[in-house]
Amino acid sequence: MNAVGNTQAKIYGIGAEFQSARDLYHAAEKIRDAGFQKWDVFSPFPIHGMDEAMGMKKSILGKIVFFGGLTGFLTAVSLEFGTSSFLYPLIVAGKPTNLYTVPAFFPVMFELTILLSAFTAVFGMLILNGLPRLNHQLFNWDRFKLVTEDKFFVAIEAHDAKFSSRSVSDFLESIGGTNITTIHGD
Amino acid sequence: MSNASASAEPAEQLTAEEKQLVRAPLVLNKRTMGWISNYISSIVEAKTPIWWYVAMAITAPLTVMCLAMLVYLIATGVGVWGNNHPVGWAWDITNFVFWIGIGHAGTLISAILFLTRQKWRTSINRAAEAMTLFAVVCAGIYPALHVGRVWMAWFLAPVPNANGIWQNFRSPLLWDVFAVSTYFTVSVLFWYTGLIPDLATLRDRCKTKIRKFIYGVLALGWRGGNRQWRHYEMAYLILAGLSTPLVLSVHSVVSFDFATSVVPGWHTTIFPPYFVAGAIFGGFAMVLTIMIPACAVYKPLHDLVTIDHVDKMCKIILLTGSIVGYAYLMELFIAWYGSNPYEQAAFWYRAFGPYWWAYWSMMFCNVIAPQFFWFKCLRTHLVWVWIIVQFPNAGMWFERFVIIATTLARDFMPSAWGMFHPTWVDILTFVGTFGLFGTLFLLFIRFLPMICMFEVKAVLPEADPHHGEAHH
């Protein structure tokens, strides 16, 4: 078995290469059934149905974005009523400054809801993914560079409860993985 | 799913009826994932081609000219433009609406076609989104500069100030500030989110340290794990869901600038849908205007941006052009049927007044010219398509000019009538914005992948996890 990174450093995990989305999908099903928890599959594009194959639930990002949008909406409401009804009530074209003016306030409410939802979606996604980061132990593995091209990978992390170097590498080989490599940190 | 796996099966095993059900492949010539990465990245990685320098030698001076005109305007005053009484909004707002409208096609392709599962969008969305951003940059110049004293533009932002004055949130002009700035910000976020996995591809292919550092930082450490993809896909879906109402709202809000006034010719409820249809119409024309030459330069791109794509975009131009034509006729009908003499006079002046040439140019370019796209032979011939879409490009500019300048030139009272004539600063600034647009687009082609590689890989038949397996 190959080893990459600083072999004196702690092991990050063991990786294996697969040749197609189909192989990766079936490998994920088997790893899930074997009961591993700290592992991931890597692919050049999102693979349809992989969440189920890995036994994962839907992303919670949608729920987070709801609160981002709510913040945007409430910001607009307080900004508009705060300034136009209390701080600087200005009657333009006979339009009232009280609650009846709300239709004219809709566009800004809408825009700020969208704006803060979008910010929450992007930055929430990055935070959930642990990004941005400049480096990662996986990047010590040269072949892993092909993950953004046309190869597929699996990595089982060392801090998984069921992890042991020998059994994991045998297991990855038995499910069809090639180029099985121990990945060390720096 | 079933379609994707069906198309993967050898066609000879299927009966004649089944063959008709098999969808045409989105990527031609059986290109592989490796080929897609290699080819698209090689455009960015190869030595800068001569044509790029030639094109840049045209657009860069125009950009400088645009900036020089803006400096001249700021230094001298907004009077260097031809704006006058009564035509207080002239080429500045015409050009603003023209450019912001062009942006709409990019968001339509990236958001609405994503939500409606139109997988053919994957090969054109990146370039179309880039076009959106650059068009909005060009558009943003005008409202920012036409306020006159640019250094006071921050008054548009609701920040506490020494005078204790706050914005009028019931004004469509302030809605416009929020709509356009939100649109630009969300478009940047959407575009950049889509770029992250492709920037990671470029990072992983880098040979030199400097490139590795730049693309490495820009890729944010993307690893392509499914634990990342699932949040990523959710974020992309949410952004598409947010951008869809947003893009429809932006041009609606722009149209409110006119429709909420009492000026005859502007005060109509048809404006929001008619503006949105026109924006998509003009935007698709601009997408084709730049994509056809880009694919002519990089010939293998024809396997990704196929004739079928061009055909579909021409159909959208035909549809939206017909909606715009319907709106023009409906405006005329309502002017007649509404029996408002001022409204009738406004439309009479548009067609037969001193700006008749603009009105009839608009009618020909936007209503007559796109009807050629009823013919499939014209929709699938790249040269003809490129020639025909120049009419919507020009026609949509004429439309905004007709709506703005001719309406203001003929108000209620003959004593308030006047003509607008552009000055040389007006003309050079507008020509310069095309240079700015072209320069930004050339830089985009040179330094970023112009086709969304990971999405194109995902529509290949072998991307299906059940590819080649028996399906039910």
Image (cartoon, helix red, strand yellow):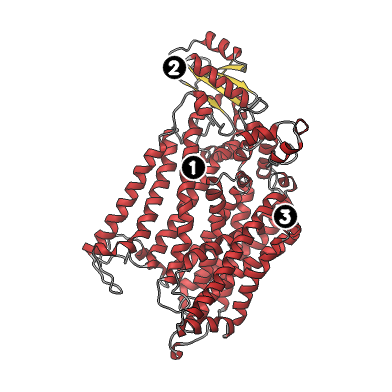
Identify the residue at horizontal 66%, vertical 36% (top origin): B460
Q: Which chain carries label 2?
A: A
The label nearer to you, 3 versus 2, is: 2
> Farthest residue toward the bottom?
B415
Where residue B12 appears, as percent x and y from the top left, is 78, 32
Q: Which labelled disc corresponds to residue B237? A: 1
Where residue B194 appears, as percent x and y from the top left, is 54, 43
Q: Could you tell me the amino acid type at mark 2?
A: His
Q: Could you tell me the amino acid type at mark 1?
A: Leu
Give yes or no for contact between labels 1 and 2 (Cβ–Cβ under 8 Å): no
Q: Mark 1 lies on which chain?
A: B
The label nearer to you, 1 versus 2, is: 1
Find numbered disc 1 in the image and state the secondary structure of the residue it sits on.
Answer: helix
Viewer-proximal residue among B371 and B456:
B371
- Report which residue position mark 2 lands on: A159
Q: Distance between the residues labelled 1 and 2?
A: 32 Å
Q: How far apart are marks 3 and 2 (CA)?
A: 54 Å
The label nearer to you, 1 versus 3, is: 1
Find numbered disc 3 in the image and state the secondary structure of the residue it sits on.
Answer: helix
Viewer-proximal residue among A184 and A177:
A177
Report the quarter where the N terminus of chain A lies.
top right
- Report which residue position mark 3 lands on: B51
| Circle 3 Cα neighbour tier, 10 Å, few/some/many (<14 / 14–19 / ≥20) | few
Q: How far apart are marks 1 and 3 (CA)?
A: 37 Å
Q: Mark 3 lies on which chain?
A: B
For residue B82, side relative to residue A105 (left or right): right
Viewer-proximal residue among B74 and B427:
B427
> Farthest residue toward the right?
B12
Question: How many numbered discs?
Answer: 3
Q: Could you tell me the amino acid type at mark 3?
A: Trp
